[in-house]
Image (cartoon, rainbow, N blue to C red):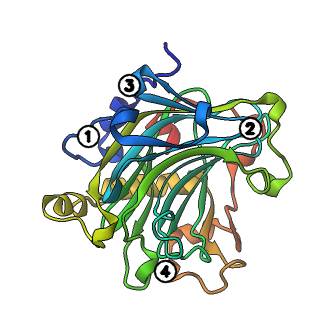
Amino acid sequence: MDESAPPSKLVVLFLSNEATSLPELPNLTTLSFEEGYTQLFGDSNLMLHRDGRAVHLALDQRTGAGFASQDLYLHGFFSASIKLPSDYAAGVVVAFYMSNGDVFEKSHDELDFEFLGNIRGREWRVQTNVYGNGSTAVGREERYQLWFDPTEDYHQYSILWSHERIIFYIDSIPIREVVRTQAMGGDFPSKPMSLYATIWDGSTWATSGGRYKVNYKLAPYVAKFADLILHGCAVDPSDHKTACQGSDAVLYDAITMSADHQTTMAKFRKKHMTYSYCHDRIRYPTPPPECMFVSPESQNFLASGEAKFNYRHRRGRRYGRSSVDAVL
């Protein structure tokens, strides 16, 4: 198999399962790099493969690399298949996210998938985050351990963003939903954003609080992206629109979580979530407004927000098949 290409069967497997299917959207097709993206930084550390339908981003002692969508979007569905660097990757950060920090410097919005590297023998960690209207003082992080080795093959990471909700998916499995509430106010992302993908040096914080650094003797570290999907409402930020118009608005706002999806997400979170800001009573003695609820989830967490019973901390565990049964 060409290692630059993800296995297409993976997407088919998860789309065929009712409890884990992605939103049914028209014209959900992948784009080549030239059709939808532009390079941000990294010159030769960004490499195109498969006629621009796969992108490799490398980190070495000289620089990291990154790319962004050519357009800004106000709501939509955004996805990529990603394969992470293998072996020792402490200090390495790979990010797949949406942001408008270059347009709204003091009031930016952001939706994040961040992948945090680790020392040899320990797994990559994944965290999601949500910022709205420059609310960076309130971190809304959640962290998860994966049920597969993200360095062995490509896996799909997706973000659905509408006027009413945000849903994060891994391999078509919903892992987090943020529903717009009056209490959140401007903290719910509401301005047009671009899609970004980057690899960079996070030695000061990414692994054990900065204890383990990037080892450039092992460079380059290469993150591979493919199956790039931009299915959104492209807008001109100078128009100051706060919602998609016409059929696009109906399309994204109509997507909700079914009872099966809610059950699947709850099972994933119980088994795989290792930290939640909503349960961090040390950081937030008064929880953020969207966390002011009684949830069965809360009994599984310490006052620090860390999970009480965390099978993922067992050393030397082997990954099973990347299947729905393995997740739940």
Q: Residue at x 40, y 22 (%)?
A: 51
- The mark lying in front, picked from 1 and 4, is 1
Q: Gap between marks 4 and 3, in whole Å?
A: 40 Å
The kind of secondary structure element at disc 1 is loop
Mark 1 and 3 residues: CB-CB less than 8 Å, in contact? no
Residue with the mark numbered 2: 62
Question: Upstream in the sequence, badge 1 or badge 4?
Answer: 1
Residue with the mark numbered 3: 8
Whether residue 322 sits left or right of residue 10 in the image: it is right
Residue with the mark numbered 4: 293
Q: Gap between marks 1 and 4, in whole Å?
A: 36 Å
Mark 3 and 2 residues: CB-CB less than 8 Å, in contact? no
**Front-lying residue, 186 or 239:** 239
The kind of secondary structure element at disc 2 is loop
Q: Give the amino acid at mark 3.
A: Ser
Q: Give the amino acid at mark 1.
A: Leu
Q: Gap between marks 1 and 2, in whole Å?
A: 37 Å
Mark 1 and 4 residues: CB-CB less than 8 Å, in contact? no
Residue 256 screen position, x and y as percent: 28, 61
Q: Gap between marks 4 and 2, in whole Å?
A: 47 Å
Residue 88 screen position, x and y as percent: 77, 34
Question: Upstream in the sequence, badge 4 or badge 2?
Answer: 2
